[in-house]
Image (tube, rainbow, N blue to C red):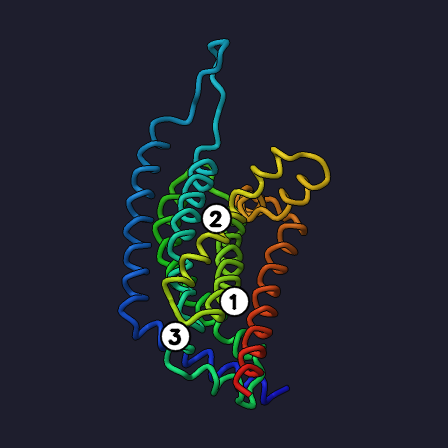
Amino acid sequence: MRIIFSNILAIYRRELQGYFASPLAYTIAGVFWLLAGFFFINLLNAYNLGSLQADTTGNTTPLDVPYLFLQAFLGVLSSVALFLLPILSMGLYAEERKRGTLELLATSPVTNWAVALAKLLAVVTFFATMVLPLLVYEAIVFGATTPPMNWNVILLGHLGLLLLAAAVLSLGMFISSLTDSTILAAVFTFGLVLFLWIVELVGQRLGGPIGNALSHLSLLKHFNNLTQGIVDSSSLVLFASYIVLGLFLTAQSVDAFRFQRS
């Protein structure tokens, strides 16, 4: 067990160092921060217009503006991540195939599960470093609200964003293990994630048990639960299931590659 953890840690460090030395990774981070900052300012201006809204009777209804702003901002971040995460995951194994090093990984003493887990942890860590700076100016804004914003809701919403990213990256890693083309890996990952994003709409149209089952698979539905401050065990289980499924399929894909070469 100790050897396995040492191997995971070694691969994790190598992969993480690769991200911080990659121009593409910095480009992705720069685009993410640029779009996040743009939407943050625009949403801040929009929600700063007032905290009261007149209803149909002419009375005013108080609104929890910071909470609404947080939900809107996290929704924007998740949409931006939908486009950027497939680019982060596309080279996890496709580059190994292209360079011819996947066979070395497949036949090494390190288990395929350990390699896949280390790669996933590294890319999720890099995404977390992209999200952390956003918390700084969120803290500045929410620190000035009266009454103070509940930080449990803020942290739970960002946890939901990280779980969403981990699920997408895990599935993208599996797709990356199937091809040596990073472009194809990114396109197919985007298509799969887009389907899991809108599958709730498909389920609502179908209705019945099948429709309910499809709706439960929706990434957006369970992400929204967490951004609303709802600690729903079914949402946590669903994200964990996607993560484990991606790891399992990746390990099986690498195993199949090894048998093809043997």
Q: Residues within 10 Å of mark 3 (few under 14, many from 20)?
A: some
Residue 43: mark in rendering: none
Judge whether 39 appears above or below 13 on screen. above
Q: Secondary structure at mark 2?
A: helix
Which quarter of the rendered picture does the N terminus lie within?
bottom right
Label 3, label 1: how far apart the Cα atoms are:
13 Å
Q: Residue at x 63, y 60 (%)?
A: 241
Amino acid type for the residue under numbered disc 3:
Glu
Q: Nearer the viewer, residue 3 or 203?
A: 203
Label 1, label 2: how far apart the Cα atoms are:
16 Å
Residue 194: mark in rendering: 2
Where is residue 213? Give x, y as percent: 68, 44
Amino acid type for the residue under numbered disc 1:
Phe
Judge whether 98 appears above or below 89 on screen. below
Judge whether 207 appears above or below 157 on screen. above
Amino acid type for the residue under numbered disc 2:
Leu
Per the image, the residue denoted by label 3 is 95
Q: Secondary structure at mark 1?
A: helix
Q: Residue at x 58, y 40 (%)?
A: 200
Report which quarter residue 187 is drawn in.
Answer: bottom left
State left or right for residue 55 relative to residue 143.
Answer: right
Where is residue 156? Give x, y as percent: 54, 51
Per the image, the residue denoted by label 1 is 174
Label 3, label 2: how far apart the Cα atoms are:
24 Å
Where is residue 21? Give x, y as percent: 30, 75
Upstream in the sequence, badge 1 or badge 2? 1
